[in-house]
Amino acid sequence: MNFDKLFEPIKIGSLELKNRIAMAPMNMGYTDPLGYPGDQVLAHYATRARGGFGLLITEAVMINPHEWYGGDTMNVSHLTDYRYYRFWSKVVETVHSYDKCKICIQLSPGWGRQGHPPVSNPSVYPAAPSAVPLHIDLRNVLGNKGWMSQIKKNIKETTGADANFDELLKIPDEVYFSEEFQNNIKKMVMGTSDFLYHNIWREAPREITVEEIKELEGRMAAQAEAAFSIGFDAVEIHSPHGYLLHQFLSPMMNKRVDEYGGTVENRARFLTNIIRKIRAKVGNDRPVWCRLSGDDLSREGFPMKTSARLRLCARRRGSMPSTFPRVVIRLPEAPSRTTGKAISPAGQRGSRTRQVCRPSFPISLHPMNVLRPLRNSQWTSCPSAASP
Ligand SMILES: Cc1cc2nc3c(=O)[nH]c(=O)nc-3n(C[C@H](O)[C@H](O)[C@H](O)COP(=O)(O)O)c2cc1C
């Protein structure tokens, strides 16, 4: 196979890249508790730029300043206002100093139902399109070696017991989703880790209001404009992987009856309004695109066909065509890895056996989250790496 093309320059709108190798967005959990990109973040991007990438895409950076954005358990980076600009501009300047490496910022309006109440204010629930709670299929989590070992470690640390999940992984969907089994497994998980329990069976999120949606649309546009002015070369809208914007796109998670729910166009309205408002601020040449899950492989979610329509809606509003392969990441409700069967009731989409075509990634149960309460308690004594 000839890889020469990979090393040739390419243009995306007004942006010229020295090669076609891009780093996917990844939240490393390196930001400080207030969301400032400190020295570790700087070092992370600097070393990747030095490695020769044509483009780096940052982790999802939160523009939503409200407590209901979905919580701070993942050490989320922020770009909510001017206090963050000089820190991000330092990252941009450093990345640019490495042989024409470019950097795109991925902006997010919130985590929605995949989020958590803030550590400092547990009564504030994340806002989502509808009050549809998230339930993670425990077999999906345990089917992943990384999560399996983190959870075992967590259980050992908290209870002293050696957990064994071999039998659980073999349980078929009919049994797993029966009321009796769910009650038993809830008791079992609750008894071993309260934190794990609340990650698997989430509380219903709060339904976001139209005023709040519109406010977020404006904030996305304002911070996209700010990102370009502090030197970022491109903006990617964080709309995949079951987070807030994806939740609007999915009929499973969006049950609204106003202009943001119902038809594909209505469900895409939050995303397309954001694109339109960004374009009104930054013009048509700047590279702005959105990341979409190709097929969310989830019960009553959206298949590839709908995702193609969503892509069209986004392009009509001014999103650039996606230039890099977009990812299909399995959502927590997706068919279980062990049985290969979908979990939807018979007759609905997904009730047939489907192969998961990309590596699966049970999004919210980040291994680092399992250990997060420990880290949070350390935060109180941890001096902020960067204060305003
Ligand atoms: C630790 C970690 C953090 C991630 N954070 C983000 C993120 O902030 N935004 C995003 O769109 N994707 C995120 N992803 C998904 C990755 O960008 C990527 O799509 C995923 O690892 C699958 O890899 P692939 O696209 O090469 O199949 C993250 C993945 C990992 C492993």
Image: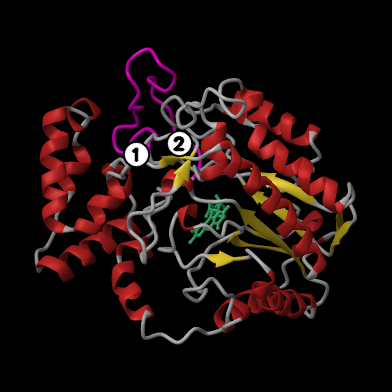
Can residue 339 be seen from the camera position used here?
yes
- In the image, is residue 244 above or below residue 121? above
Which type of secondary structure does the marked residue at label 1 adopt? loop
Q: Which mark is residue 106?
A: none
* Mark 2 vs 1: CB contact within 8 A: yes
Identify residue for label 2: 356
* Circle 2 Cα neighbour tier, 10 Å, few/some/many (<14 / 14–19 / ≥20): some
Determine the CA span between mark 2 and mark 1: 8 Å
User: Which of the four quarters of the rendered structure image does ligand 1 lie in?
Assistant: bottom right
Which image quarter is the C terminus in? bottom right
Which type of secondary structure does the marked residue at label 2 adopt? loop
Question: On the picture, is 38 further left or further right than 207?
Answer: right
Residue at the image point whose x is 64% and y is 78% from the top: 47
Residue at the image point whose x is 43% and y is 27% from the top: 354
Residue at the image point whose x is 32% and y is 49% from the top: 141
The residue stretch that appears in magenta: 333-358
Question: On the picture, is 20 further left or further right than 38?
Answer: right
Outermost residue toward the front in this view = 211
Q: Residue 175 lies in what quarter of the image?
A: top left
Task: Characterize the magenta stretch by its predominant secondary structure.
Answer: loop
- In the image, is residue 191 above or below residue 27? above
Residue at the image point whose x is 36% and y is 86% from the top: 381
Which residue is more in the foreground, 77 or 294? 77
Name which residue type carries label 2: Val
Identify residue for label 1: 337
Q: Residue 26 lies in what quarter of the image?
A: bottom right
Q: Indicate whether residue 341 is drawn in magenta.
A: yes
Whole-percent x, y for residue 328 in the image:
54, 41
Whole-percent x, y for residue 107 in the image:
64, 56
Q: Indicate whether residue 85 is drawn in magenta.
A: no
Question: On the picture, is 320 further left or further right than 147?
Answer: right
Whole-percent x, y for residue 28 in the image:
50, 68
